[in-house]
Amino acid sequence: QMGNLGLIGFNGGVEGGFAEIQGFFEEACSFMAEQDDVKTVMVMSHWDVEGSGAAADTSTPGAYDKMKTLPGCKELDAKRMLKFTSGHIHCNVKDLYGYTGTGFRVAGMGMWGELNPCSGDGCKMCKGGSD
């Protein structure tokens, strides 16, 4: 936790899928829900899609979909306090894959040309909710 911003980072490249890391998410969700001063919880990982290292349920959007059903995170998500950010594809995108106001990809640094279909640089800056 930094100020009123809660941070949950994870490695989506686990071989056992979400089941392998679910216990860690349960612990993190419970902890974050108990913090009275947390206004936003940002879930962070690398992969935004299945493949190249992540399973469908361990990509950042896939893990978010599972997390938002867990005790603690379910309540945070209902209050629109649970967000996620990923990288991998070198493009900056808000409302990633239709997750309006929830999913973000800031990864537009370091690759140019054919491997990068986007232009522009980006840097993650997170701010918790106001208070």
Image (cartoon, rainbow, N blue to C red):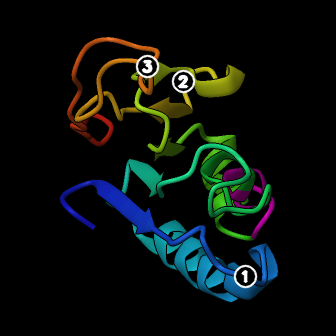
Counting residues from the start of the chain, the first of labels 2 and 3 encountered is 2
Give the Cα distance between marks 2 and 3: 29 Å
Identify the residue position indicated by label 1 in the image.
15
Q: Is 108 placed above or below 35 here? A: above
Could you tell me if residue 99 is visible in this image? no
The reply to whether dot 2 and dot 3 touch (C-beta < 8 Å) is: no
Q: Position of residue 116 (x, y in %)?
A: 41, 23
Counting residues from the start of the chain, the first of labels 1 and 3 encountered is 1
Q: Would you say the magenta stretch is mainly helix, strand or loop? A: helix
Query: Is 69 colored magenta in this rendering?
Result: yes
Mark 1, other Cα within 10 Å: few <14 / some 14–19 / many ≥20: few
> What type is the residue that disc 3 sits on?
Glu
Q: Is 103 placed above or below 67 here? A: above
| Residue at 34% across, 18% down | 113
Identify the residue position indicated by label 3 in the image.
114
> What type is the residue that disc 1 sits on?
Glu
| Residue at 59% across, 71% down | 29
Q: Position of residue 32 (x, y in %)?
A: 48, 69
Could you tell me if residue 3 is visible in this image? yes
> What type is the residue that disc 2 sits on?
Gly
Give the Cα distance between marks 1 and 2: 30 Å
Counting residues from the start of the chain, the first of labels 1 and 2 encountered is 1
Camera-side mark, 2 or 3: 3
Identify the residue position indicated by label 2 in the image.
101
Numbered tag placed on residue 40 in the rendering: none
Q: Is residue 68 left or right of residue 104?
A: right
Mark 3, other Cα within 10 Å: few <14 / some 14–19 / many ≥20: few
Q: Is residue 18 left or right of residue 44?
A: right
Q: Position of residue 127 (x, y in %)?
A: 24, 39
Label 3 residue SS: loop
